[in-house]
Amino acid sequence: MAETYKLRVKSKGTEIEIEGDKKFVEGHFSQFKKLLKDAKLQSARNAGSSKKGRKRGRKKKPGRKPKKEKRVKLDLPNMELKQILEEAKPDKEDTNILVFSYWLNKRMRKREFRSPDIEAMYKEIGMEAPNNITYYLRKLSDEDKGLLQHGRKNGRYKISPDGLKYITYKTIKV
């Protein structure tokens, strides 16, 4: 009666089990080790080539210090809409829509707003509204950002506490 050998290996979420006579298990295990070595070498080569930054041996240039960032709190209740837009320096439509959301929710005392309300704010300021405001409202309200919250009815939104913090604190480079 031949003895049965069993070998189980776990590595980074992968599990391999080899079962059979001694010669079969040892042969397949040695092949498996070679495959792992080759895979590690290949991943090390790929990781080394994709690294960005200074090359080894080069020193950092003297006199260059990274710019520090400072968070400044804006006095939103005492500012006009145009001032808030200038201070927030919106580089994306998201920021504009968030500022308008703040204005509608907190200053105009609208509990919830919809995309036509945001579009009216663009017209009031004299800016060109994006084609699909609803897209930005959904994007700002998804779980990753959470800067807007869904309202009681479908298609309505209100600004979240995180959205209020995002507008209130401005990051500047010192």
Image: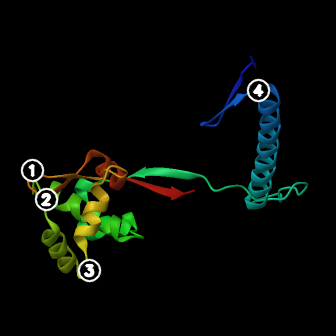
Along the polypeptide, which appears first: circle 2 or circle 3? 3
**Residue tagged by mark 3?**
131
- Give residue 81's quadrant in the image: bottom left
Cα separation, mark 2 vs mark 3, equals: 18 Å
* Mark-to-mark CA distance, 3 and 4: 69 Å
Q: Is residue 140 visible?
A: yes
The numbered mark, 2 or 4, whose residue comes first in the sequence reads 4
Residue 132 x/y as whole percent: 25, 75
Q: Which label belongs to residue 156?
A: 2
**Amino acid carrying mark 1 in the image:** Arg
Q: How far apart are marks 2 and 4 (CA)?
A: 68 Å
- Residue name at image x 27 percent, y 55 percent: 141
- Residue 35 in picture, x, y percent from top left: 78, 46
**What residue lies at 80% left-to-right and 59% top-to-bottom?**
54
What residue would you read off at disc 4? 21
Side of 17 relative to 37 (left or right): left
SS for tag 3? loop
